[in-house]
Image (cartoon, helix red, strand yellow):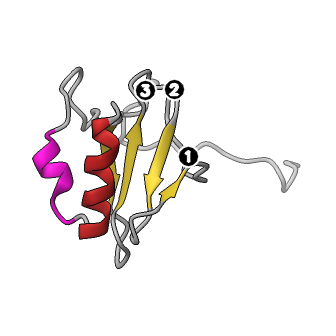
């Protein structure tokens, strides 16, 4: 008598599938392309633009802008060495220790 917890294999008209690796979506960012600064600046608040321009004088670069739904944009700037980053808040002040998680 078969044990009730055992499973049975149902034969069907389908063919056995081989192990297919998970499909990956391609990276949306272009490799090695510098971001378009004009496009990055679109939609930034006036106070954020003033602060970003002031930091760029000292060698900081606008790397990307996070745009969360129904919130102010979050511009992220890196120093010239690429070792530090800051976030410009919507009032134009700097957050030098943001809780932003970055991919490496």
Answer with left or right where residue 82 lies relative to residue 35: right
Return the disc, 3 or 1, that comes first in the chain's sequence: 3
Mark 3 and mark 2: span between their CA atoms? Answer: 35 Å
Name the quadrant containing residue 64.
Answer: top left
Region of the chain picked out in magenta, as a range: 36-43
Q: Would residue 31 be seen by someone viewing this image from the given angle?
A: yes
Q: Residues within 10 Å of mark 3 (few under 14, many from 20)?
A: few
What residue did someone put label 1 on?
Answer: 101
Residue identifier under label 3: 21
| Residue under numbered circle 2 | 83
User: Which of the two residues, 79 or 19, is positioned nearer the viewer here?
Assistant: 79
**In the rendering, at what x and y percent does residue 76 appear?**
39, 47
Q: Is residue 83 above or below residue 77?
A: above
Q: Secondary structure at mark 3?
A: loop
Measuring 31% from the left and 62% from the top, which residue is drawn there? Answer: 48
Residue 40 magenta: yes
**Residue at the image position 42 percent from the left and 31 percent from the top:** 79
Asked if labels 1 and 3 touch by Cβ distance under 8 angstroms, the answer is: no
Q: Residues within 10 Å of mark 2 (few under 14, many from 20)?
A: few
Residue 41 shown left or right of residue 82 in the figure: left
Looking at the image, is mark 3 or mark 2 nearer the viewer?
A: 2
The residue drawn where x is 28% and y is 37% is: 57
Drawn side of residue 80 relative to residue 49, left or right: right
Q: Position of residue 63 (x, y in %)?
A: 32, 39
């Amino acid at each position: 008598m078969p044990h009730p917890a055992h499973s049975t294999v149902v034969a069907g008209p389908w063919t056995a599938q081989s192990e297919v690796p998970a499909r990956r979506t391609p990276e949306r960012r272009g490799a090695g392309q510098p971001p378009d600064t004009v496009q990055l600046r679109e939609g930034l608040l006036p106070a954020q633009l003033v602060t970003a321009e002031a930091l760029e004088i000292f060698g900081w670069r606008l790397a990307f802008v996070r745009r969360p739904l129904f919130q102010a944009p979050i511009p992220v700037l890196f120093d010239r060495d690429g070792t530090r980053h800051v976030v410009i808040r919507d009032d134009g002040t700097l957050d030098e220790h943001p809780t932003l998680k970055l991919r490496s």
